[in-house]
Image: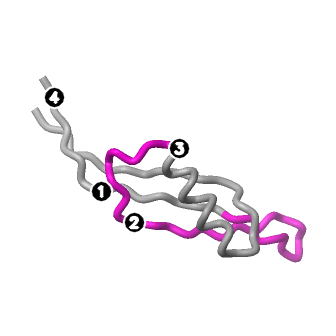
Amino acid sequence: MANSNFKKASIRLTFDNGFDALGKPRKKVKAYHNVTDTAAATEIFETARVLTEFGMKPLMDLEKQSNQSIFA
């Protein structure tokens, strides 16, 4: 039977940064580390909403990335 061990997690916020000279959308990515394994999606979303209020760019995407070790 396999087990897993939580290593670390972070959230990535992707912001709309306008358009380049060719008309392609530009993105700005900001990562925040030290997210706990038990952080629920609602809590992460509320945190991202508050962080977005500090800036002027609209939020395009929000991701939680976590790393786990899997062993037998």
Which quadrant of the figure has residue 13? bottom right
How far apart marks 2 and 1 lie (CA) works out to: 8 Å
- Residue 33: assigned label: 2
Q: Earlier in the sequence, mark 4 or mark 1?
A: 4
Q: Earlier in the sequence, mark 2 or mark 1?
A: 1
Left or right: 15, with 2 as reference point = right
Q: Which residue is mark 4?
A: 2
Q: Residues within 10 Å of mark 4 (few under 14, many from 20)?
A: few
What amino acid is at disc 4?
Ala
Left or right: 52, with 31 as reference point = right
In which quadrant of the rendered image does the N terminus lie? top left
Q: Where residue 24 appears, x then y in whole percent?
A: 83, 64
Left or right: 42, with 66 as reference point = right
> Is 61 one of the magenta-colored residues?
no
Q: Are marks 2 and 4 in contact (CB under 8 Å)?
A: no
How far apart marks 2 and 3 lie (CA) works out to: 17 Å
Q: Residues within 10 Å of mark 3 (few under 14, many from 20)?
A: few
> Is 26 one of the magenta-colored residues?
yes
Q: Residue at x 20, y 38 (%)?
A: 4
Q: Where residue 43 appears, x then y in whole percent?
A: 49, 49
Q: Earlier in the sequence, mark 3 or mark 1?
A: 1
- Residue 42: assigned label: 3
Q: Which residues are magenta?
A: 15-41
- Residue 8: assigned label: 1
What amino acid is at disc 3?
Thr
What amino acid is at disc 2?
His
Q: Residue at x 69, y 75 (%)?
A: 55
What amino acid is at disc 1?
Lys
